[in-house]
Image (cartoon, grey):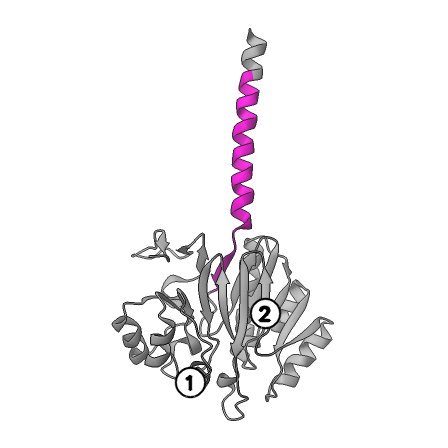
Amino acid sequence: MKQKILQGFLLFFLLVMSTINSQVFANEKIPEVHFIDVGQSDCILIKSGKKNYLLDTGWGYHSSRVISYLQYNNIYKIDGIILTHYHDDHYGGMDMMLKSMKVNKVYLPRHEAKDKQKVLNCINKNKVKIVWIKKGWKLKARGVYLEAIGPINNNLKNENNNSIVLQGKVDNINYLFAGDCENAEEKDMIREGLLKKCEVLKVSHHGFNTGTSDEFLDTIKPSVAIITSNGMYSPQDKLLNRLKSRNIDIFTTKDYGNLIIKNKKIKSTRVIKSILKNYDIKR
């Protein structure tokens, strides 16, 4: 009798553990996007199962913060670093990242720029493969499909308008990662009819009033705007007012710290007064 009870208990225990393990495994496979708090710069982690991609690396002096964040999330290998353009608030952490993590590839814009050779020297020194990006390039992983829709033209006067702009889906949520693109690049994409509606907009240029125009917002109609900023110089009021007038929900890394979108929810790693609780993107 005791043996049957023990066998029944063990069977029940194994069933419970099997259910928990399957749920954990399924949860690990859900794609996620992390907007890492690197002050007035960009570093975005796109994670899909065991595949990890970084969209920009942030300032060099925030490298240790980014590496610590990745390691805290059990990430020691980066499948690809995607550089949107050649400004050091986007590529500054490249050298430390290549030295500290196993990086398979670095994806670079083709256009010529003042700091391009500096970036190339850094990558070649660390013996990492370079892949060139242009309009139409695609990033594909489980639950991830992003396409480079800009830049359309090479802007010799303003490097921000050479930003790689990625549009597509992560875990069936429509994203637009706008880099630092300004009004001129926005107009190019609108004119070419490339922009689609999105749920989540990574606001360009840290929320400066140099882009994210009325026409741009009315074309993509986002419900959520993520702004990577330390709050010292941006986001600027005119841009914020354009977002607020359209009832777009605004989340800044200055206010919320690291922002994580997973399972169609936004979570923050910072404890603040008005803490995020299961903010649902699909409304």
Q: Please state, as top left, top right, bottom left or bottom right, where the C terminus lies in the image.
A: bottom left
Q: Which mark is residue 187?
A: 1
Image position, residue 193 (x, y; %): 45, 79
Residue 168's place in the image compared with 239, above or below, is above
**Residue occupying image coordinates x 54% and y 48%:** 28
* Label 1, residues with CA under 10 Å away: few <14, some 14-19, many ≥20: some
Image position, residue 231 (x, y; %): 37, 73
Judge by depth and name the residue closer to the eye, 141 or 111.
141
Residue 213 in sight = no
Residue 106's place in the image compared with 262, above or below, is below
Where, by quadrant of the figure, is residue 22 drawn? top right
Q: Determine the CA span between mark 2 and mark 1.
A: 22 Å
Q: Which residue is mark 2?
A: 138
Type of amino acid at the residue the image marks with label 1? Lys
Q: Please state, as top left, top right, bottom left or bottom right, where the N terminus lies in the image.
A: top right
Earlier sequence position, callout 2 versus callout 1: 2
Type of amino acid at the residue the image marks with label 2? Lys
Q: Which region shows up in magenta?
A: 8-36
As helix, strand or loop, the secondary structure at mark 2 comes to strand
Outermost residue toward the left in this view: 245
Judge by depth and name the residue closer to the eye, 94 or 33.
33
Where, by quadrant of the figure, is residue 144 drawn? bottom right
